[in-house]
Each structure stands twice: as structure tokens, then as C-alpha cells.
Image (cartoon, helix red, strand yellow):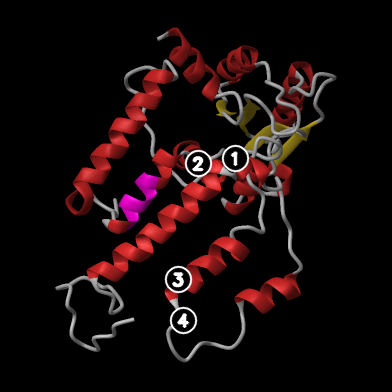
Amino acid sequence: MNRQGSKNPNGGADTLGMNAEEMRSLGYQVVDIVVDRLINRDSEAAILTGEASELLAQLGGPLPDKPLDPRESLSLLAGVAFTHQQRGDHPRYFARVPGPSSFAAILGDWLATGFNAITASWAGGSGPATLELVVIDWLRQLLHLPPDYEGVLVSGGSHASLTAFAAVQAQRGTGTVYLSDQTHSSLPRALKVLGFTASQIHVLPSDEQFRMPLTALREAISQHRRAGARPLMVIGTAGTTNTGAVDPLPQLAALCEEEDLWLHVDGAYGAPGPCAHAAVMS
């Protein structure tokens, strides 16, 4: 590779000494790797787990004292690091929640990284911020939510739940939270991060359909009020990770309104349902 020292032939760009031709060549290599992988993913294993010692031997070693060959590094990433993992886009992969990425999303991620897009403030990222607002509003329309609904894009469901619980805590303080034994493990973990104690996280055994039991929930709320505790929130799920069960959400909403409790619904597998229905109807 052509190293220019302190001289940068590409203006102010941080290219690590690569010229435009070298950057394009490596970029084309990445495109070829990704496209080949997408086209042939059906022939891969749904999950491939390696031995730690073998992976460390291939990917680790002493700290390099000089640059590695970039083409070899890209091949190592694709052939070793990214090969040994679960493949959520495999046709025989039915575990966990992470959905497959589309090629459109791959292109978007590449552009966002290439433009160093950072939406930390309106002044510093008005364009990307507007894009976020547009996407959120489109999602709102697909979910048939009222026009005054708002939201933010986050890294995933765990971060989303943590953000929602922080909003509840900021508005209503702390108290007892009710969930079932089918609620995703990230939700009680998020409550603990925010300072909710074990006694404030009340887990109810699910019914024979793996749903939150209304009678037991009502009795628990009543019992806690009599004991001097402060019921705060009920967590329902629209499509649990284990079975796809949907809690009785209309009844939970009615109970929460009656008891003046906050209702949080973990969209999980169920939230995209209205989106899919709307897409089919259109």
C-alpha cells in the first residue's frame, strides 16, 4: 500500500494513507463478499460456534507493530469472525428475536458510516434527525397510532424498554411493576438498571395459554395496596419470545385505567402485525 506519511493526497479525509483507487478496490471487495454471502446463505449452517482457543489463534496474537494487509484482514473477518455466529437471516433459523437485515439496510448503514452521520443535536445533524422523524411517523401510521404519538429510534428492544421505563420513572416515580414469567428477560433487567428492587418486580405465573392471568394480577395489585406498596406499571407482551403468546391487552388496558397504572406493551413479535396487515391491504 502507498503510505504518504503526513501528506494526505485525499485532502482532509482520514484515509490511513490509502488513495482513492485503493479505497474503491477494498470497497468493491466488501460488496462482493456481502453479495456472495447473501446469495448463498441458504447453504450455510444456521448457527456455527467455534472453539475459543481456535478463534483466538486465528484472530488474535501479539499486538501488530505494522499495518496488516487490508485484503487479508477483510477475508479474515468474513471467513472467520463473521462466520462463527448465529445467522438470523437463514431460512432454518427460528430462534431469538433479531430479524434479518435487508440489502437496503446494508447500503444505508454503509452510507451512514461513510458520511459519519451523528444525530446528537439538531444543529449538528438536522438532515439525519429529519430522516428519523420521517421514519418514526411512517411507523406510527402503519401501526395506526394517533398523530400526537412520538418516539425515537434506538439500537434494539432492550434499549427501547429501558428508555420507556425511564420515561415512566421520570413522570411517576417508582413503585411495583407486574409482569409474567413469559416476559422477555431484558425487561426486568432494565428495571434493575433503573434502580427497581427485587420486591418491586412482581412476576406472575402465566396461565395455561402462557398469557398474563388477569385474576391473579388484580389480586396482586389489591394485596400490595393493602400492604402499603405503590403499584406503578403492568408489562404486557404482544407475542412472547418463547411461544408467541399475546397477553389479553384490551383487558389489561381496562384494568390499568381502572387502577391508574401505567401499561407498557412489549411489541416483540406482535407489533409488526398491524404493519403487515396495512401493507397487504394497500
Three-letter residue code for mark 3: Arg
Question: Disc 4 residue type?
Answer: Leu
Query: Which image quarter is the N terminus in?
Result: bottom left
Q: In this rendering, does residue 106 appear at all? A: yes
- Give the vertical position of 257 relative to 129 (above or below): above
How far apart in space, not on screen, are marks 3 and 2 (Cα)? 24 Å
Of helix, strand and loop, which one carries label 2? loop
What's the CA distance linking mark 1 and mark 4? 31 Å
Q: Which residue carries the number 2 mark?
A: 101
User: How far is mark 3 from mark 1, CA to CA?
Assistant: 26 Å
10 Å crowding of disc 1: few (<14), some (14-19), many (20+) = some
Question: In this figure, which residue is indicated by the disc labeled 3?
Answer: 71
- Mark 3 neighbour density, 10 Å: few (under 14) some (14–19) many (20 or more): few
Which of the numbered marks, if any, corresponds to residue 68?
4
Three-letter code, disc 1: Asp
- x, y percent for residue 241: 70, 33
- Mark 3 against mark 2, which lies toward the viewer? 3
Give the quarter of the image for residue 238. top right
Give whichever of discs 3 and 1 has the lower sequence position: 3
Which residue is the site of mark 1? 89
Q: Looking at numbered disc 2 in the image, what kind of residue is underneath it?
A: Ser
At 29% across and 51% down in the image, what residue appears?
119
**Mark 1 or mark 2, earlier in chain:** 1
Residue 5 at what x, y percent from top left? Answer: 25, 89
Marks 3, 1: nearer the viewer:
3
> Quick one: SS at disc 1?
loop
Distance, label 1 to label 2, CA atoms, is: 7 Å
**Residue at coordinates 45% horizontally, 37% vertically from top-left?**
171
Describe residue 280's horizontal placement relative to residue 118 as left or right. Answer: right
